[in-house]
Image (cartoon, grey):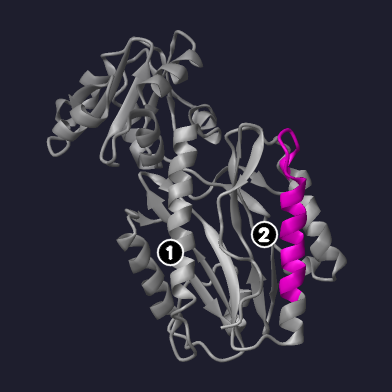
């Protein structure tokens, strides 16, 4: 973690420092596992600022950082560094917090926006980060195998989601990556249909989108099943989505633009007549946060590199009928594309 802070300093000019307020970057640069802290990083010193509840924890986890008590006041804390420009996370810090902290700077210092510079290193995951994401995804695979043997007509979406969540926690997950999506019947046409009290009926599509956190890193996967027997239209839509995903997966190589992968899947769905029913991007990077960069979208021209971990999740959503999404999580590592999601993608009828 300390090396990450050193590398961040290498990107700073001699008169620049960074002040980090958001938990993801606090964890990434220091290893501290609480959001009740701030980091102040510069060529002249590296500090973690917290209160008495977390002083010992910070001393244990944030190796290479001097621990400062927040009760000493930010005027005294900012006086520890001579740098004139202090980069801050403009996408994280609230306006009121910005105004309050800015007033604590000395007369020669000022805040400048540096969110992109601070976030940039997190795009490329090292082998240890990929290992943790893979372990989180493995828990998700086990959860899917568990739940498909439990689902039956008459259960509610909420019951199914809760069962998945409890299982993942029992398997070693520390938290959920996001609120579990369990959307059935016509509700499966809602890409983010968080579980409701709707009862599952025979003939329903059931889309399950879930993930967990393992040692600070997220997983994400989606599978769509049919409770009962699938009808012809359900099979048609499912196979189009599966074809779109497989086409995109086959096209992924190091150096290709993200927008090209999105286009490969989108073209399959559009050619089948469902282009207007696929409204979201094809995928997003996953790491400490569930949505990171780069992304598979029509507007993302970044090229894929070793260390990128990103979802491939095409979908078709038809109002008053239902929807299908199939999502895998892939990693580029050692010039290879590794699919971290192992669950079957053939249409499952329960």
Residue 274 at what x, y percent from top left? 80, 70
Does residue 110 appear in this view? no
Q: Is residue 66 left or right of residue 141?
A: left
Which residue position is annotated with label 2?
Answer: 280
Q: Is residue 243 within the magenta segment?
A: yes
| Farthest-out residue, right | 271
CA distance separating discs 1 and 2: 18 Å
The quarter holding residue 303 reads top right
Find numbered disc 2 in the image and state the secondary structure of the residue it sits on. Answer: loop
Residue 158 at what x, y percent from top left? 41, 78
Please state the extent of the stretch shown in magenta in the rendering.
Answer: 237-258
Q: Is residue 30 left or right of residue 294?
A: left
Which of the two labelled residues, at mark 1 and mark 2, occupies the earlier sequence position? Answer: 1
- Please state, as top left, top right, bottom left or bottom right, where the N terminus lies in the image: top left
Which residue position is annotated with label 1?
Answer: 179
Find numbered disc 1 in the image and state the secondary structure of the residue it sits on. Answer: loop
Total number of numbered labels? 2
CA neighbours of label 2 inside 10 A, class few (<14), some (14 to 19), many (20+): some
């Amino acid at each position: 973690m300390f090396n990450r802070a050193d590398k961040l300093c290498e990107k700073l000019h001699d008169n620049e420092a960074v002040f980090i307020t958001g938990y993801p970057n606090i964890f990434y640069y220091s290893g501290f596992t609480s959001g009740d802290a701030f980091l102040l990083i510069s060529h002249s010193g590296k500090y973690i600022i917290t209160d008495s509840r977390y002083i010992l924890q910070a001393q244990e986890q944030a190796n290479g950082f001097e621990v400062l008590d927040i009760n000493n006041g930010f005027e005294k804390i900012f006086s520890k560094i001579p740098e004139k420009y202090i980069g801050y996370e403009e996408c994280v810090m609230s306006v009121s917090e910005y105004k309050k902290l800015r007033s604590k700077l000395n007369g020669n210092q000022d805040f400048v926006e540096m969110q992109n510079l601070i976030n940039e290193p997190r795009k490329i995951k090292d082998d240890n980060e990929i290992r943790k994401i893979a372990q989180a995804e493995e828990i998700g695979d086990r959860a899917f195998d568990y739940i498909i043997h439990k689902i039956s007509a008459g259960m509610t979406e909420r019951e199914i989601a809760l069962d998945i969540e409890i299982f993942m926690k029992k398997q070693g997950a520390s938290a959920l990556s996001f609120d579990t999506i369990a959307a059935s019947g016509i509700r499966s046409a809602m890409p983010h249909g968080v579980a409701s009290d709707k009862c599952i009926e025979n003939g329903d599509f059931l889309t399950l989108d879930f993930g967990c956190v393992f040692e600070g890193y997220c997983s994400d996967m989606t599978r769509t099943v049919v409770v009962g027997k699938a009808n012809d239209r359900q099979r048609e839509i499912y196979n189009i989505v599966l074809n779109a995903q497989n086409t995109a997966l086959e096209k992924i190589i190091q150096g290709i633009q993200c927008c090209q992968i999105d286009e490969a899947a989108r073209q399959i769905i559009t050619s089948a007549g469902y282009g207007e029913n696929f409204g979201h991007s094809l995928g997003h990077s996953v790491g400490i946060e569930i949505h990171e960069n780069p992304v598979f979208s029509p507007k993302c021209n970044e090229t894929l590199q070793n260390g990128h971990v990103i979802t491939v999740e095409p979908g078709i959503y038809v109002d008053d009928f239902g929807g299908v999404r199939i999502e895998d999580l892939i990693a580029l590592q050692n010039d290879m594309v590794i699919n971290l999601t192992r669950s079957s993608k053939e249409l499952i009828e329960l």
